Image (cartoon, rainbow, N blue to C red):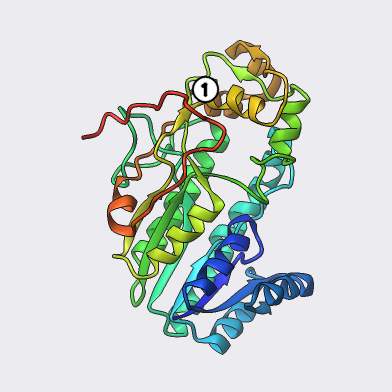
């Protein structure tokens, strides 16, 4: 299959390109620079330089390749994971996902692609009992930035799944960890934890769903040939902040994270940070396990920590 990947040199893209090649696909990655193009060539893929926000440029690029499938991994996130930098990047990221992704999807349809896969979120589910399934909505009524992201993903999914002339697949990834991510030894979160500047905001009950970038890439490859629709690509055992953060600190040789009250968290980092700490809802990967053969590794720093009960089945 000829596959066109946008966002090909991002955290998931760097794992996805070799996974696609290993599966026998003919891969072309879209990037914004010649350096990115050389990175793709080194990985064994063809590269094309284009700005996703330039509709004519994207149309020409996709028309030239005429792919069977397009994978949209477009993001514009900061290198540092802090409330200030996330807020500063939010509008840029939203514009790239909505406008850039819209340009890419139109180009895919015009070029005759039969399938369009898009990155979505498996960690912004609306409140509810147990682990969330794909039929449940995202948290559009949450704290400001979380609600904004949930609305963006909802809009993207509506566009992709409702498109005429192309099969749509929405991949609701968990928090990425592993090489090239914030959540890895030497990554930005690890540095914050080492400095004891990433606290447990009590009670730390927000449940986080994770996925290693290599597992996310493998499932994305499988989704090229699965039924259209939505898939949660998350780990088997979503864990609350109060569990994973101290375990992460231990795994990277950092001191235990400090604990702060919810009011202290609000004053220091704002409502979104507190939402992440105490309101996130985990997701179920049962559908992806069944239909994609998804078999994610256990979150490596949890060890023998107790699983969160899904309340499903």
Q: State the quadrant of the C terminus.
A: top left
Residue in front for this viewpoint, 22 or 100: 22
For disc 1, the neighbor class at 10 Å (few under 14, some 14 to 19, many from 20) is: some
**Is residue 156 visible in the rendered structure shown here?**
yes
Asked if residue 264 lies left or right of residue 167, the reply is: right
Secondary structure type for disc 1: helix
From the top left corner, tell me how far across and down residue 127 is, in percent: 37, 29
From the top left corner, tell me how far across and down residue 32 is, in percent: 72, 70
Quarter-of-image position of residue 165? bottom left
Quarter-of-image position of residue 157? bottom left
Residue in front for this viewpoint, 296 or 150: 296
Asked if residue 293 lies left or right of residue 269, the reply is: left
Q: State the quadrant of the N terminus.
A: bottom left
**Is residue 271 visible in the rendered structure shown here?**
no
Q: Residue at x 29, y 65 (%)?
A: 227
Residue in front for this viewpoint, 172 or 143: 172
Vertically, is 130 above or below 46?
above
Asked if residue 129 lies left or right of residue 192, the reply is: left
Residue in front for this viewpoint, 310 or 143: 310
From the top left corner, tell me how far across and down residue 211 is, in percent: 50, 45
Q: Residue furthest left?
A: 313
From the top left corner, tell me how far across and down residue 168 is, in percent: 37, 66
Q: Residue at x 41, y 62 (%)?
A: 159
Asked if residue 192 lies left or right of residue 66, the reply is: right
Residue receiving disc 1:
243
Total numbered badges shown on the rendered structure: 1
Vertically, is 262 above or below 249?
above
């Amino acid at each position: 299959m000829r596959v066109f990947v946008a966002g090909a040199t991002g955290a998931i893209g760097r794992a996805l390109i070799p996974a696609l090649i290993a599966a026998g696909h003919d891969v072309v990655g879209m990037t914004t620079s010649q350096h990115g193009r050389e990175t793709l060539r080194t990985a064994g893929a063809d590269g094309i330089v284009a700005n996703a926000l330039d509709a004519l440029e994207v149309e020409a690029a996709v028309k030239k390749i005429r792919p069977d499938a397009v994978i949209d991994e477009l993001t514009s996130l900061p290198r540092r994971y802090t409330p200030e930098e996330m807020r500063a990047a939010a509008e840029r990221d939203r514009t790239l996902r909505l406008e850039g992704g819209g340009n890419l999807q139109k180009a895919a349809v015009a070029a005759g692609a039969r399938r369009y896969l898009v990155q979505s979120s498996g960690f912004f589910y609306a409140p509810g009992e147990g682990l969330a399934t794909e039929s449940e909505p995202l948290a559009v009524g949450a704290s400001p930035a979380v609600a904004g992201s949930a609305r963006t993903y909802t809009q993207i999914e509506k566009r992709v799944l409702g498109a005429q002339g192309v099969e749509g697949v929405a991949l609701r990834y968990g928090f990425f960890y592993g090489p090239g991510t914030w959540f890895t030894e030497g990554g930005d979160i690890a540095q914050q934890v080492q400095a004891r500047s990433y606290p447990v905001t009590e009670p730390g009950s927000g449940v986080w769903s994770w996925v290693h970038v290599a597992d996310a890439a493998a499932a994305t490859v499988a989704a090229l040939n699965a039924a259209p629709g939505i898939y949660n690509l998350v780990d088997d055992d979503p864990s609350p902040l109060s569990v994973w953060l101290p375990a992460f600190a231990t795994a990277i040789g950092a001191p235990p994270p400090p604990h702060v009250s919810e009011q202290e968290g609000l004053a220091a980092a704002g409502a979104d940070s507190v939402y992440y700490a105490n309101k996130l809802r985990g997701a179920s990967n049962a559908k992806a396990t069944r239909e994609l053969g998804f078999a994610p590794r256990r979150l490596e720093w949890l060890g023998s920590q107790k699983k969160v009960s899904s309340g499903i089945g």
